[in-house]
Image (cartoon, rainbow, N blue to C red):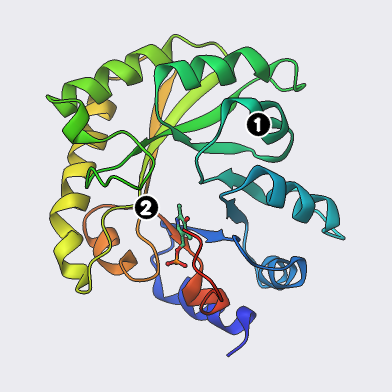
Amino acid sequence: MSISTNYAKLREEIPKDVKIVLSAKTRTVEEIEEAIDAGAVDIGHNYVQEAGQIYRALKKKPADVRWHMIGHLQTNKINKALRIFDVIQTIDSLDKAVAIDKRVETAGRDIVEVYIEINIGSEFAKAGIKPADHEPFEEYVETLAGGISALAHLRLVGLMTMGPRFGNPEDVRPYFSRTKTIFDRIKALSLSNVDMKYLSMGMTNSYRIAIEEGSNMVRIGTAVYGKRECDIR
Ligand SMILES: *Cc1c(COP(=O)(O)O)cnc(C)c1O
């Protein structure tokens, strides 16, 4: 099936108030253009360099397309990232947030929306803040949110998590549920300059469960673009 058909089917299946961020890693400019033509408005990429190449090569850049950084952001790539991405979903420390905040104005921007990335399964090889490293974890994330709220050029608007990948996606449910609890706790703090709008959770194999557990933003690659030739995750 074609990318546009896949996207249309997915958009129909997923509730209207849940955003679909299309994960563009390993995809070509033509594939991404097809998705945009089919109505995709949120594009996610893991790598600054590749995202920049695609961004420059796109023939038309619809004003309503938003670019989300969903991969680990190295400090030395922040300046470049700020020229491409509208949203950075992968804040994993206060140091990183401060480093981005410092560079926002130089990049000619006023405010950048950011999410805290939580590695809810404390998985060794994945990015994001791990509960195993920071117990009590809920308090740790709340403190980080407070730190980000003091930064003038960042606006914390959500949480992002990958969640462990299981053969049976049902097994990831408790991890998603814990992430939703943390999301609600930060929201309930009503911190100034923080507007918890998005819980970015769920991928091709897990989005249905993620939505049942309160996700309102799923990040999808395979279900729309097909299998990746080599999985570089
Ligand atoms: C690749 C990727 C996705 C999409 O994964 P699929 O299984 O292809 O849907 C979502 N989020 C992140 C951070 C990714 O790296």
Does any portion of residue 64 appear in the rendered image? no
**Residue type beneath disc 2:** Asn
Q: Position of residue 96 (x, y in %)?
A: 49, 22
Which SS class for mark 2?
A: loop
Q: Quadrant of the N terminus?
A: bottom right
Q: Position of residue 69 (x, y in %)?
A: 56, 43
Q: Position of residue 165 (x, y in %)?
A: 28, 63
Does any portion of residue 157 appear in the rendered image? yes
Q: Looking at the image, which is closer to me, 204 or 65? A: 204
Dot 2: few (<14), some (14–19), or many (≥20) neighbours within 10 Å?
Answer: many
The residue depicted at 69 percent of the width and 50 percent of the height is: 51
Circle 2 residue: 216
Which SS class for mark 1?
A: helix
**In the depicted structure, whether residue 180 falls above or below residue 146:** below
Circle 1 residue: 77
The residue depicted at 66 percent of the width and 73 percent of the height is: 38
Position of 164 compared to 202: left or right? Answer: left
Q: Which mark is residue 65?
A: none
> Who comes first in sequence, dot 1 or dot 2?
1
Position of 208 compared to 172: left or right? Answer: right
Q: Position of residue 123 (x, y in %)?
A: 26, 47
The residue depicted at 17 percent of the width and 59 percent of the height is: 173
Q: Which mark is in front, 1 or 2?
A: 1
Position of 24 compared to 151: left or right? Answer: right
**In the depicted structure, whether residue 44 falls above or below residue 33:** above
Q: Are marks 1 and 2 in contact (CB under 8 Å)?
A: no
Mark 1 and mark 2: Cα distance apart in space: 28 Å
